[in-house]
Amino acid sequence: MNRVVVYPLSVSWVVIGVFACVGCGSGRVTAPSADVESARQIRATLVSVSKTGQSAVASATGTGWATLKGRFTFAGTVGDPKPLVVDKDTEVCSMGGMKLVDHSLLIDPSNKGLASVVVFARKTGRVKTAVTETLLLLDQKNCEFLSPVFAGRVGQPITVKNSDPIGHNTNISGSSFNQLIPSGAETVYKPDAETGMPTMVTCNIHPWMKSYAVFRKDGYVAVSGKDGSFMIPDLPAGETIEFQVWHERSSGPNGAVGLEQPGLKWTPKGRFQVTLNPDEVKDLGTLEIPASSIGS
């Protein structure tokens, strides 16, 4: 039986060089002896470097998933909501003496929880794709959007509904969606692009109507509820994630909410950093926003 011998890489190149040079000069050509031990050391070094690189990537990427939650509160005196100027279709929009008010500052009087605060991950190394998309509904009733701020995932279906007996025109800024929704009708909108900060939603027919929408490709976004609480599940563990915080009334740049939170490396641009452990439910606790940051 013939034996097949596999030479180290350095030996192969030496042999090729010898055959290439045969006959290129007078006299006999003698091949130098192969340094097999050096070749083995080089191979071992390359394998070691490869494994180290793989370990570094695994460490940077992390494994497992985790949850981040917290609660925003308003540290200040809660004033009366400002009335809106309603000067069109008053038979519906001001029916029975109904008064529409500004919903840009929603504070729970029982615990001063601040609603409509947006929190989203700016970028992550991994995304958990096996998620269940919740039904999103943007309804217009009594000449106002029932969701002052709402969030969704890029590509997630959103039912845009008109529950009023008059027509509304829904215009989502920064998108191609600018559509008349007749009385009692609805349509479906699928956002096809990510928003940086939340974008404005308006009705061109009734200029006092206003809402905000935020769409993220990874779905790692939340809007604080009535009591000020928020939760973002299925975040990638083992990596440092930078989050963005926004509120419509914030005095920060583009609505960014800046807080004094050195432990989270919170910046004036409304960004903070968190590293989560696998299966961890990290509670940031109560995040108090001073009245000076959000005007009442």
Image: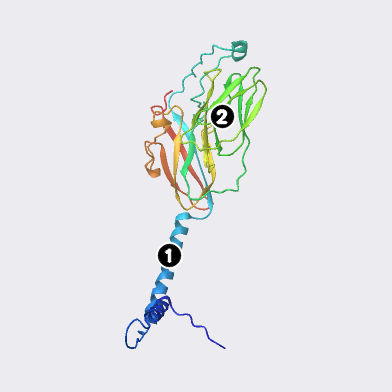
Give amino acid for label 2.
Answer: Phe
Say what secondary structure mark 1 lies in: helix
Give the left or right position of residue 281, taking residue 56 as reference.
right
Give the left or right position of residue 186, taking residue 101 as reference.
right
Q: Residues within 10 Å of mark 1 (few under 14, many from 20)?
A: few
Quarter of the C terminus within the rendering: top left
Along the line of sight, which residue is nearer the eye, 226 or 7?
7
Q: Give the number of the disc on residue 52.
A: 1
* Picture layout, residue 228 above or below residue 279: above
Badges 1 and 2: C-beta atoms under 8 Å apart? no
Label 1 to label 2: alpha-carbon separation: 49 Å
Question: Which quadrant would residue 9 be assigned to in this image?
Answer: bottom left
Along the line of sight, which residue is nearer the eye, 71 or 177?
177
Give amino acid for label 1.
Answer: Thr
Quarter of the N terminus within the rendering: bottom right
Q: Which residue is mark 2?
A: 177
Say what secondary structure mark 2 lies in: loop
Q: Position of residue 162 (x, y in %)?
A: 63, 23
Along the line of sight, which residue is nearer the eye, 85 or 199?
199
Q: Position of residue 211 (x, y in %)?
A: 53, 26
Task: Look at 46% across and 31% down and name the residue there.
Answer: 247
Along the line of sight, which residue is nearer the eye, 22 or 124?
22
